[in-house]
């Protein structure tokens, strides 16, 4: 079994939650979202993020607006919709329950070694 593949799958599983959490703070340009993810070691490539942003927008969890840029073409800034905020809040509850359960299991198993 390939450990790198397993680690990548774990990251992908929480990427949607992380992107929605980033956008709770303010509107972001895609490059800024990628930078935030890289800063916390959730290394992703643009090819992963763009389709995810499109899917979230198509599900009415995000909206976007175009803004002129001083350094090139207009930029697309993403924003959480009301539906997206509610969805994020539900994910946060699930994440807290899940992270508590995983911590309980992994800590228990570490003490038994």
Image: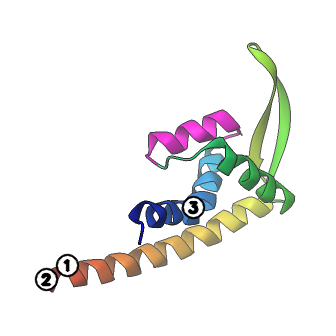
Q: CA distance from mark 2 to mark 1?
A: 6 Å
**Residues in magenta, as a range:** 26-41
In the image, taking residue 72 as reference, residue 5 lies left or right, namely left
Q: Residue at x 55, y 63 (%)?
A: 14
19, 52: nearer the viewer: 52
Q: Which residue is mark 2?
A: 113
Residue 71, image x and y in percent? 73, 14
In the image, taking residue 52 as reference, residue 113 lies left or right, namely left
Picture disc at residue 23: none
Q: Secondary structure at mark 1?
A: helix
Q: Residues within 10 Å of mark 3 (few under 14, many from 20)?
A: some
Q: Which residue is mark 1?
A: 110
Q: Residue at x 78, y 16 (%)?
A: 72
Q: Are marks 2 and 1 in contact (CB under 8 Å)?
A: yes
Quadrant of the image occupied by residue 78? top right
Picture disc at residue 12: 3
Q: Residue at x 43, y 60 (%)?
A: 4
The colour style of the image is rainbow
Q: Does residue 21 sit above or below 105 in this rendering?
A: above
In the image, taking residue 25 as reference, residue 2 lies left or right, namely left
């Amino acid at each position: 079994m390939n450990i790198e593949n397993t680690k990548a799958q774990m990251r992908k599983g929480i990427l949607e939650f992380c992107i929605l959490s980033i956008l709770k703070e303010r509107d972001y340009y895609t490059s800024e979202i990628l930078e935030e993810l890289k800063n916390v070691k959730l290394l992703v490539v643009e090819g992963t993020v763009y389709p995810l942003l499109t899917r979230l927008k198509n599900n009415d969890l995000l909206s976007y607006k175009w803004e002129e840029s001083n350094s090139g073409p207009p930029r697309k800034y993403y924003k959480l919709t009301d539906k997206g905020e509610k969805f994020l809040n539900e994910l946060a509850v699930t994440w807290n329950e899940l992270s508590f359960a995983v911590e309980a299991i992994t800590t228990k198993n570490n003490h038994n070694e």
